[in-house]
Image (tube, rainbow, N blue to C red):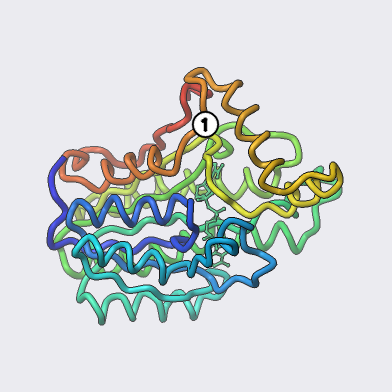
Amino acid sequence: MAGLEGKVALITGAGGMRGVGRASALKLAAQGAEVAITDVQRDASDLPPGEIREEWRGIHSVSEEVEALGRRCLPLYCDLGDGEQIEGLVEQVKSHFGRIDILVNNARAIIGRDKASVTELEREVWDHFLAINTTAVFLCTKLVGQDMVARGEGGRIINIASNAAKQASAMGAAYSASKFAVLGLTQASALDLAPYNITVNAVCPGPINTDRMSYWEREQAAGRGMSLEEFRGRIVRDAGERTPLGRIAEAEDVANMVAFFASEEASFITGQAYNVNGGLLFH
Ligand SMILES: NC(=O)c1ccc[n+]([C@@H]2O[C@H](COP(=O)([O-])OP(=O)(O)OC[C@H]3O[C@@H](n4cnc5c(N)ncnc54)[C@H](O)[C@@H]3O)[C@@H](O)[C@H]2O)c1
């Protein structure tokens, strides 16, 4: 895989200790990229227990890890639900690094409140999922895409979608609709940006062994008198048993596909939605 020296990547939702954003930042940095990483400032009640126990400092901890690899890193807070903050984010990254070559749209709304039948789903929850999982991906693509087009040196846009972008589940209307939309956005953007040598692709992971915060999992754990981590461990084990390759994805499995799409070797691939799911789904 060719190196990414001289390239600058912007990765959203990158503050999680075990998240895909952090794994992608470290993978791209290890291949030579400088990285800007962003996340929302979350209340302690919205952080996974492991991050609190280990005094994890989100994007600032990830930034130190990237710098330890000898690469520059710019950690910035941004609430992706706010279009003005997204504009400010892109401007700050451009003025700090002078360019953005790779955009990884990885953030998603905190899950759990969306887990409801379509007849029970709150409008506010629907709106929030569409805002963070879809509209923010559009806005980042638009603003970063404008800069890539203006510079005329090509680029890479990588959207982290999901199995749920291809196959919905019961009680998944908001999440699935928001992720199906990302695949439509990926295809249309790929066509719009192809003349500028900017590729746009999506990664569709099955379940990933991250410490994602889920209000639903927290409630279920409490109802069973279990810790969230114990309950989460059970979900990870059960989902692994249902997966042909016998385990669920690690964040690094997804980051490997991000790095491939970012590489020179992937220069002729655009508009695709590639599964990283251990054989769970084939289309
Ligand atoms: N974890 C899984 O099982 C799984 C499965 C399939 C797809 N995915 C996708 O992979 C990606 C990464 O998943 P993960 O489990 O590492 O992440 P995650 O659920 O921990 O969330 C990613 C990040 O998004 C950030 N975020 C939440 N609200 C935000 C806001 N308003 N503004 C800015 N950032 C905000 C969070 O703080 C977090 O750092 C997501 O797009 C997710 O949909 C995850």
State left or right for residue 61 relative to residue 136.
Answer: left
User: Looking at the image, which residue is at 55% across and 22% down?
Assistant: 243
- Closer to the camera in the image, 144 or 22: 22
User: Where residue 144 sits: x, y (%)?
Assistant: 33, 67
Residue drawn at point x = 24 percent, y = 57 percent: 29
Task: Give the percent coordinates (x, y) of residue 195.
Answer: 21, 52
Tag 1: residue type? Ile
Q: Secondary structure at mark 1?
A: loop
Position above or below: 53 against 266:
below
Horizontal relation, residue 121 to residue 249: left or right:
right
Front position in the image: 5 or 164: 5
**Residue pictured at 68% horizontal, 49% vertical:** 174
- Which residue reaches farthest front? 53
How many numbered discs?
Answer: 1
Instruction: Examine the rendered structure and indicate whether residue 198 appears above or below residue 62.
Output: above
- Image quarter of residue 41: bottom right
**x and y, in percent, of residue 61 in the image:** 41, 67
Quarter that holds the N terminus: top left
Give the crowd class for mark 1: few <14, some 14-19, many >=20 residues within 10 Å.
many
Residue 128 found in image quarter: bottom right
Q: Position of residue 4 (x, y in %)?
A: 16, 54
Is the CB of mark 1 within 8 Å of ligand 1?
A: yes
Q: Quadrant of ligand 1?
A: bottom right
Which residue is at a point 51% across and 17% down the rendered structure image? 244
Relative depth, front residue between 72 and 148? 72
Q: Which residue is mark 1?
A: 248
